[in-house]
Image (tube, grey):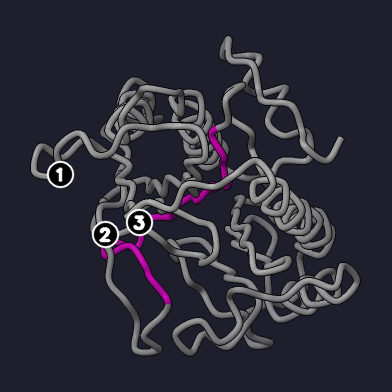
Amino acid sequence: MVQIKTPEQIAKMREAGLVVAAIHEATREVAVPGATTKDLDEAARKVLADHGAKSNFLGYGGFPATICTSVNDVVVHGIPSEDVVLKDGDIISIDAGAIVDGWHGDAAYTAFVGSGHAPELVELSRVTEDSMWAGIAAMKNGNRLLDISRAIETYIRRQPKPGGGKYGIVEDYGGHGIGTEMHMDPHLLNYVSRKRGKGPKLVPGFCLAIEPMVSLGTPKTEVLEDDWTVITIDGTWSSHWEHSVALTEEGPLVLTSPDGGKARLAELGVTAAPDPLA
């Protein structure tokens, strides 16, 4: 069953989303050469405490931290540690969440540590982020879940990969519903699968975490012995971007973006819904 939210509930999710946005802002400042991924987690904990919010990552299935810190070939679910020291030239995806009055927010971004990154890494992050926005733009009244998957995959497949070949769209992980829990139905693939059908119709009150994960090589992954850390099986580096989005009568509202998605959606010819907290 897909949980449909009222406008009042979406406003609460917007509050949680803005806390997540604040975590992103704080961790960007800390993600520098010499910092540990534990330093990033501590920055996120402080934001949560300052906003009176709870972590939806800490303790989830036994996860021991408040954010996921996934460096280079780690796709998702990297565990913050004082033993992982960021180096100049690394890339890292930081996945963060928050709970406000029982309502969840969840979003991720890819950051560049230091400088001198190879052009293919810069392009990898751009393609991943832009595919997410293509998926968000497809979140329209009357569309189907499949339309979001198709928009994400189509965008990625149309981008030339530096050096040739194809980008790997990670197969084992994808987006999800979000609301009174962090992970809810439906599961959102980042590619089209004929086996999954068209999926449910999108209606006002539908909320999704849209999150493409893309590698420079294989779409295949494996989980390390800690039962959390997901890496590419060929060692190629990957990017991960995510936003939580609510569909309203007026269109999509990007709950975890400071401006509600207004600027980026306008570039795609889509009008973002008004911010209920404005």
Is 156 within the magenta? no
* Image point (46%, 29%), residue name: 139
Tag 2 residue: 172
For badge 3, the amino acid type reads Asp
66 relative to 232 in the view: left or right: right
* Image point (82%, 65%), residue name: 30
Question: Looking at this rendering, what residue extends furthest in the right direction?
Answer: 50
Image quarter of the N terminus? bottom left
Tag 3 residue: 185
Which mark is first along the chain, 1 or 2? 2
223 relative to 220 in the view: left or right: right
Q: Is residue 49 above or below residue 233?
A: below
Name the quadrant containing residue 163. Answer: top left
* Image point (54%, 40%), residue name: 125
Tag 1 residue: 196
Determine whether the residue tagged by mark 2 lies in a helix, strand or loop.
loop
Question: Looking at this rendering, what residue extends furthest in the left direction?
Answer: 195
Q: How many marks?
A: 3
Determine whether the residue tagged by mark 1 lies in a helix, strand or loop.
helix
For badge 1, the amino acid type reads Arg
Is 246 within the magenta? yes
Determine whether the residue tagged by mark 3 lies in a helix, strand or loop.
strand
Residue range (magenta): 229-247
Q: Which of the pair 79/132 is nearer the observer?
A: 132
Residue 242 image point, x, y percent: 54, 48
12 relative to 78 in the view: left or right: right
Residue 78 image point, x, y percent: 51, 74
Give the CA separation, mark 3 to mark 1: 13 Å
